[in-house]
Image (cartoon, helix red, strand yellow):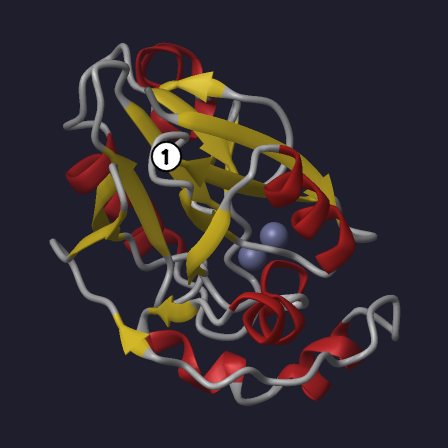
Amino acid sequence: MLLVETFPVGPLQCNCTVLGDPVSGDAIVVDPGDDVSKVLAMLEKHGLRCRVILNTHTHIDHVGANDELKASTGARLMLHEADLPLYDNLRVQSEWLGGVMPPPVRASVDDHVHQGDRISAGAVAGEVLHTPGHTPGSLCFHIDGTEPLLLSGDTLFAGSVGRTDLWGGDYDQEIESIRKRLLTLDDATQVIPGHGPVTSIGRERQKNPFLA
Ligand SMILES: [Zn+2]
Ligand SMILES: [Zn+2]
């Protein structure tokens, strides 16, 4: 049985998701945003140890707590290397937002992940789907289990797709990524986006105006 907890963090309300194995106590935290106390409280509530921090991409609202969470837990930080130019410029990203979020400390990256890579912690396991477009290194995390689940980052939202007007964004590439890597998944796949409500692949296939 996989434990899944999603909660918004930080001023831009990025969805952080904790994926836990209640038997071994191992967990993967996807996009800790910038509220480490909220993340640590959720881990403690379920008696989990964070083994892996995975960033769906390196926009400042998704990576803010990387350093504090890594320091508190000793977890390995994983992301796609095509997003390193963004990750190396957190101060510039902070300026884009007019200082709503001060630039966080840049935690060192332990593993660069790629299309098709498997990531696991205890019984929590899944596959990396590289879906460039919102950013060059945007990825989705397709989690194993009897109930199919996808963490879609800022690539696919309920009724929308990620903005592509920031550095490295490419709308045509984003739509191609969604068609090639996400719409090929089962309709029943639950989708937890990087912001906003949960949806499913079937629902987006039918109703998302950007995918018509
Ligand atoms: Zn983003
Ligand atoms: Zn975001």
Dot 1: element: loop
| Depicted 105 relative to depicted 177: above or below | below
Residue pictured at 43% horizontal, 38% vertical? 19
- Viewer-proximal residue, 27 or 145? 27
Q: Indicate the quadrant where residue 46 lies.
A: top right
* Residue at 35% across, 31% down: 23
Q: How many marks?
A: 1
Q: Is residue 53 above or below residue 20?
A: below
What is the x, y in percent for residue 210? 42, 30
- Return the residue at label 1: 21
**Does the rendering let one see residue 48?**
yes
Q: Is residue 35 visible?
A: no
The amino acid at mark 1 is: Asp
Q: Nearer the viewer, residue 27 or 136?
A: 27
Q: Nearer the viewer, residue 201 or 79?
A: 79
Question: Would you identify the image quadrant in which residue 68 lies?
Answer: bottom right
Residue occupying the point 50% across, 35% down: 193
User: At x 14% / y 57%, what residue is drawn?
Assistant: 117
Can you name the residue that lies furthest to the right here? 99
Q: Quadrant of the C terminus?
A: top left
The answer to whether residue 82 is above or below residue 141 is below
